Image (tube, rainbow, N blue to C red):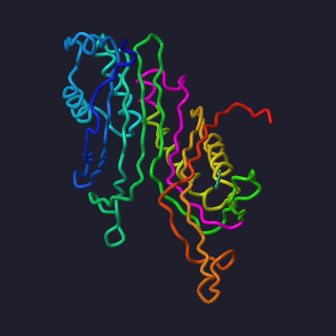
Amino acid sequence: MLTQAIYGKDNVRVLKVKKNPQNPNYQDVIELRVCVLLEGDIDESYTKADNASIVPTDTVKNTIHILAKQTEVWPIELFGATLTNHFVTKYSHIHAAHASITQYRWTRYEVDGKLHPHSFIQDGAETRVVHVVKRDTAGSAFSINSGIKGLTVLKSTGSMFYGYNKDDFTTLKETTDRILSTDVDASWLWAAKTVPTLAAVEKLASSGVFDDAYTKARAITLRTFALENSASVQATMYNMANQILAATTHVESVHYELPNKHYFNIDLSWHHGLKNLGKDAEVYAPQSDPNGFIKCTVDRTKSKL
Ligand SMILES: O=c1[nH]c(=O)c2[nH]c(=O)[nH]c2[nH]1
């Protein structure tokens, strides 16, 4: 029996240029990678080889291009809502649409001390992302989950890890000073009641609410990572998530997924007693794997503890 059916186009790449009507030389760019997946009355395309219900994935790709041209693409939350809304309203047999959008960082750069009107630098591997779901059931709001991915950070001190469970499987040594590094994957879910319709999403978008949450989430992550003397990845991410909830109003919950990218101490004492441990540690061995992997979701419910 068919228990899931969902399909669409993945990795649709789009770059849009926005030209300032007063000064066409001044431009903005946005580069995206888009995945749109559809669900609905499509089972017979799988079970009976009847393609009648299939909106071809090629059409999905064309739609992404056409809507990128004809509608507002900034911010990606709005573009995701526009895309998903299109598919569930245009096709009566499509009952849910999912859009996952990755936005690359093209940052305007300075030339002779002034931000250049149309030149940008690819500012690292970090991306801004959104996952939007729209169902055609009456009264069904958008599900919009915004986030940051691939923001790689490292601090060379100001991180500890001690007091953990120890038993006959434990070899890890306690430390009050270690390197902490991660690739930040943070996301925040918008309360459904604040995004009931495309008009509501448009309103939030034009008032800067999505961009503001992104800017705050990024700043809080970087600031907390730097300033806090971290007791653990767990405690630090919980602290970050709570600050994001406090700094935003329409966000229902915040989710972090952080690899703990280990940098091992190297004992060099075998070489003429060379000191490279504890307070003398300078040379470390970066580990590509394995890594810790630590996740949490924090919402606004008051803790009972
Ligand atoms: O911050 C940490 N959390 C852990 O759960 C853990 N486990 C480990 O070996 N090192 C660390 N560090």
How far across and down, in percent of the image, does residue 249 sit?
60, 35
Q: In the image, is residue 188 above or below residue 232? A: above
Region of the chain picked out in magenta, as a range: 176-203
* Screen quadrant of the C terminus: top right
Residue 195 is inside the magenta segment: yes
The answer to which of 257 and 293 lies nearer the viewer is 293
- Residue at point 64%, 37% (across, down): 298
Q: Residue at x 59, y 32 (%)?
A: 252
Q: Assess whether residue 202 is covered by the magenta stretch.
A: yes
The residue sitting at 26% across, 42% down in the picture is 13
Q: Nearer the viewer, residue 174 or 258?
A: 174
Count of numbered circles on the image: 0
Q: Residue 193 in the image: x percent, y percent?
A: 55, 22
Q: Quadrant of the N terminus?
A: top left
Q: Residue at x 58, y 43 (%)?
A: 295
Q: Is residue 212 left or right of residue 269?
A: left
Q: Does residue 97 lie above or below 9 as drawn?
A: above
